Image (cartoon, grey):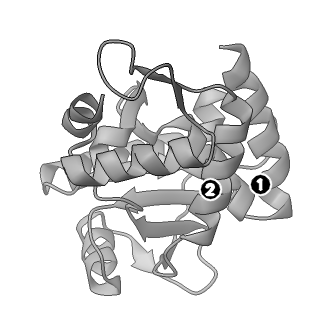
Amino acid sequence: MPKYVASETGLALSTVAESLKFLERDGLLDSEAARGPLSRRHVPDVNALVDSYAAAAERLRSPISLRLGVLWRDPIKGAIDAGHTWSAADISWAVTSALSAAVMAPLLTELAPMEIYVTGRTPGDLRRAATIAGLREIDGGRLVLRPFPTPANEAVTRELKSGLTSVLWPRAYADLRAAGVRGEEAAEHLREEMSRA
């Protein structure tokens, strides 16, 4: 299993093995045997895993971000257009929070917070991405750019519709929860819809 997870995520085998051990120690993964053909792991309680993941994602969230002013009438189309520009410049990107939830589990509320992850580690990397997409930094801007939270980047994303690349739903859920009161209702709606799927 570690080799499979490492190949799917692009993470180092040692990182994956350590992560799986951590999840087993916390009771979030089970296996019938320590080694061999019966050592396949499974998740005994999906809700406990999602809760633990969301808490860790919030605790480990990078403080690096950039607020941008956007006047997008259609935020999904605006994100897709910016994403095409980033892709052409070889910058990985993925929407999260309300932008992801608006497609995965629509809820009739304002799309906030609007957040997009892009390749980079520093505020300068985020400014470069903003400039490439023709977006301007502004205090209180509606769109927040953040660096991808893990080195896995696009290995933990998928295309949802018409070129919209999104993080997987547990990450969007965690990011919505971290947004506070405005995101909590959308986060719970997203979780309920994904649990039914």
Question: Is residue 67 in sight in this rendering?
Answer: yes
Residue 73 seen in render? no
- In what quadrant of the picture does the C terminus appear? top right
Q: Looking at this view, is 4 or 129 the one in front? A: 4
| Relative height, residue 183 to residue 121 (above, below) | above
How far from the left and from the top, in percent, is residue 49?
64, 39
- Residue 158, label in figure: none
Task: Residue 10: give x, y in percent of width and height.
Answer: 20, 44
Dot 2 alpha-carbon crowd within 10 angstroms: few under 14, some 14 to 19, many 20 or more: many
In-front residue for pair 146/43: 43
Q: Is residue 166 left or right of residue 182?
A: left
Q: Which residue is mark 1?
A: 183
Between circles 2 and 1, the one closer to the viewer is: 2
Q: Eyeballing the image, is 79 above or below 143?
A: above
List the residue tagged with mark 2.
Answer: 175
At label 2, which amino acid type do we have? Asp
Q: CA distance from mark 2 to mark 1?
A: 8 Å
Q: Quadrant of the N terminus?
A: top left
Q: Secondary structure at mark 1?
A: helix
| Residue drawn at x 39%, y 26% as measured from the top left | 162
Q: Is residue 49 left or right of residue 157?
A: right
Query: Is 168 placed left or right of 43 in the picture?
Result: left
Which residue is painted at 53% across and 41% down in the image?
24
Q: Position of residue 152 (x, y in %)?
A: 29, 50
Tell me where residue 58 sits by quadrant: bottom right
SS for dot 2: helix
Residue contact at pointers 2 and 1, CB within 8 angstroms: yes
Going 58% across and 27% down the picture, which residue do you hit? Answer: 43
Q: Decide: few, some or many residues near mark 1? Use Cα within 10 Å; few <14, some 14-19, many ≥20.
A: many
